[in-house]
Image (spheres, rainbow, N blue to C red):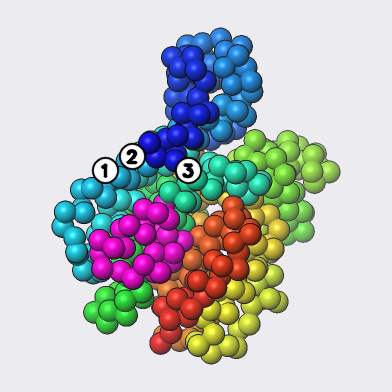
Amino acid sequence: MSISATRASRLRPKNGEVAGQLVDAYLEQMAETGVVGATVRVVAARAGASASAVSYHFDSIERLYVTAQAEAVARAERWLDRTLDDVAPSAPLPASAFPVFAAQVIARWVDQSILSQAEACAMQDASWGGAEAGPWIELWNGFWRRTAAVFSIEPEASLIIAAVLQSERIGHLAKWRALHDRAALYEVSERLIARLTGDATLLARPDVWRDKAEELSCRAVSFPELNAGAGRIAEAVVGAVDAGGEAALTHRAAAARAGVSLGAVTHHFPTRTALAEAGYAWLYGTIVALAGTSVPRKATHADMGLHIRSFLDVGLAAPGVRALEVFFLSATRDPSLADFAARVRYSRGLSTWEYLREAAPHLTRLDGVLMSHLVTGLGRMISVSPGRAEEILDRSAPLAERMFRA
């Protein structure tokens, strides 16, 4: 029995039928609404059980969440094993075949909404110090390590692959324009392999679909210019969400934190969508400003490992990072926020690229995306294993420097 399956079995109560129904109901509800909507009454009703059944079998809704996460990881492990079993007989395959496989895996993974949203909630929970992201990161790291062997990729590169594709995988939860989303996913996977292997043919290919998706998403959503009053409210939105999670993404919470009337908030931002856009715009501007004072802009391209460390330091120290996760992940479950989610997804890496263009003109817009994904993925790994921070950085920095050199 695998480690994740053993953990799920240990956490599940002995009276399996009702407990199992509650676990299933929790996972289904979490996929639709996130943790915020998976309340005792809602989950119990979905399972056809009484509210008291939750405390009887699990002591608390928090314990049910932990058990549901363990069950989701166990199911995901079986799914990934089957996926790798499908391709393993064809080994060895060239690295150039990897992008098709990676894009297919991620697209199919997102279609497993119960599992993919469970992972997303665990990643969001990690921002508050939750421990449930660790098994997910370990699971996917192991999967990409085994996959690298199938596709003739050096084992050490699997850390970079895992970090980049973890962030891209979460981004692909934003369902917008199916054709553009899938094609852009492939282009990211292809650019990743092009950079890791130095394949000149792959490096020369244009990134038509992702560029077009970025253009269209910018047309669909323009982040607001914030005057003093609106900026104060937007800052309050970030503070409320950073402290209280998705449940605090409300006009009332923003008004209370900003010390203004509810009418003042709705005057500036009449909808929840507008509230999220304003919060994100304020937060993005704050992080960019912080990066401007923290990141060495005049380094040569030989210092890409230093750049990665600098960007990572900014990300880990930036205010409102938890809110950033909430804004995006809540948008992936709310159809009214689809344009916003797409704008966030396809704006990724823009400031990173702009910072480095002068020092490293060989980098493309998509290289900026890869670097942003790498920093985010490594940051999540470090957040769940802070004791391994130096090890993770020492392993990744030389590879990053080699990847992004001219």
Residue 341, compared with residue 367, is above or below; it is above
Sequence-wise first label, 3 or 1: 1
Q: Which residues are magenta?
A: 140-165
Within-10-Å neighbours for mark 3: few <14, some 14–19, many 20+? many
Q: What label sits on residue 119 in the rendered view?
A: 3
Disc 1 residue type (three-letter): Arg
Q: Position of residue 275 (x, y in %)?
A: 63, 46
Within-10-Å neighbours for mark 1: few <14, some 14–19, many 20+? few
Numbered label tally:
3
Residue 266, compared with residue 153, is above or below; it is above
Q: Nearer the viewer, mark 3 or mark 2?
A: 2
Q: Is residue 338 left or right of residue 186?
A: right
Q: What label sits on residue 78 in the rendered view?
A: 2
Question: Residue at label 1?
Answer: 82
Residue at 54% across, 46% down: 133
Q: Position of residue 242 (x, y in %)?
A: 69, 47
Q: CA distance from mark 1 to mark 2?
A: 6 Å
Q: Secondary structure at mark 3?
A: helix
Contact, CB < 8 Å: mark 3 with mark 2? no
Disc 3 residue type (three-letter): Glu
